[in-house]
Image: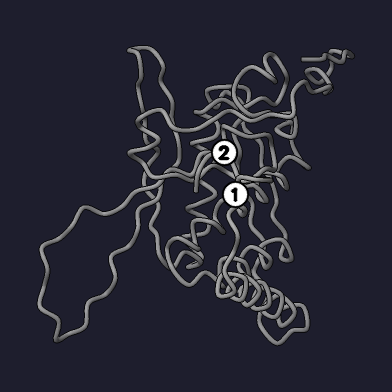
Amino acid sequence: MLASFPTGSDRLPESADSRFAKAAGAAAFWLLLLWVLLGVAPAATAEVLRVCYNYGCVAEAEVYFGDQQLTQVRALLGVARNAAEEREKLSLVVGWLLGWAGQQTPIRADRGGNYADAGVYGRMDCIDHSTTGTRLLRMLEARGWLQFHRVLEPVQRVRYLFEVHYSAQVEVLEPVAAANDAPDPPAPAERYVVDSWFRDNGQPAVVMALPEWLDGGGVEESAGAVMVAGVPGDGMSNEH
C-alpha cells in the first residue's frame, strides 16, 4: 500500500472479479461480526495497553480496548485471504486502535508529521508511533489474529546523515511447504513498515515495502492546525 490512496481520475476501473472479491470480503466481515454479536461466536476479550506521546515516549498512558472494539478488529483481520489483504486490513486496524486510544488520552491531538502539531500536548513523534505501533501489532499477534505476518522490532532509517526515522514493521511468513515438495533455496522474507506517524490520529497507517520506506518513501498528510487543551493544570488553550 502506498502512502496515499488513489482518488478521482487516479483510480483505475475495477474488474467485475475485483468488485465481487471486495463485496465478498465485506459480506464475510459483517457476517462474522453478526455471529459474534448474536453469541454464535465468542467475543474477543478486552485489553489494556500503554501508548506513548509527547516525543521520545517521555509520557505514557493506559488505554482500554473493549470487547466489542476488539471483536471488530478480529472480524476485519479474519477475512484476509493472503498477506497483501492482511496488510490492507492492518492499515485500517492500526488507525482504529489509535483513534480509540485518542478518545481516552491526549494523543487525539496528534497530527501527521511533526509540524502541524508542534508544541501540542499529546503530539507523537516517530519514536512514540513506532513504540506504540509495535505494541499494538504484538497484541494482535499474541491473540493469533495475524495469519500471514510476524511482528519485528521497530526499524530505523537515516537519510542525509541527520534525518532519523523509526517505524513498526512486520515480516511476511513463509508458506508451509507440502511434505512431498522439494525444498527451494530460502528467499529473503518480505518486510513492510506499518507507519502511523505520517497521518493524523485515527487515520489508516501507511503500509509500504521496507526498501521503499528506507529510500525515503512516505508523505506527511494532515488536516492541519489543531485546537487542543494545553498541559493539564495550565488553564490555557493553544492553537498550532
Picture quadrant of residue 226: top right
- Looking at the image, residue 55 lies above or below residue 234: below
In the displayed structure image, the side of residue 104 where residue 193 appears, left or right: left
Q: Which residue carries the number 2 mark?
A: 196
Residue 53 percent location from the top left of the image: 62, 28
At 65% from the left and 50% from the top, the residue drawn is 97
Q: Which numbered disc flags the more N-terminal residue, 2 or 1?
A: 1
Picture quadrant of residue 33: bottom right
In the image, 52 versus 112, the foreground residue is 112
Q: CA distance from mark 2 to mark 1?
A: 8 Å
At 61% from the left and 76% from the top, the residue drawn is 20
Please count the marks in the image.
2
In the image, 217 versus 192, the foreground residue is 217
Of the residues shown, which amino acid type is indicated by label 1? Answer: Val
Residue 81 percent location from the top left of the image: 48, 72
Q: Which residue carries the number 1 mark?
A: 94
Of the residues shown, which amino acid type is indicated by label 2? Answer: Ser
Q: Are marks 2 and 1 in contact (CB under 8 Å)?
A: yes
- Looking at the image, residue 117 lies above or below residue 145: above
Picture quadrant of residue 213: top left
At 58% from the left and 74% from the top, the residue drawn is 21
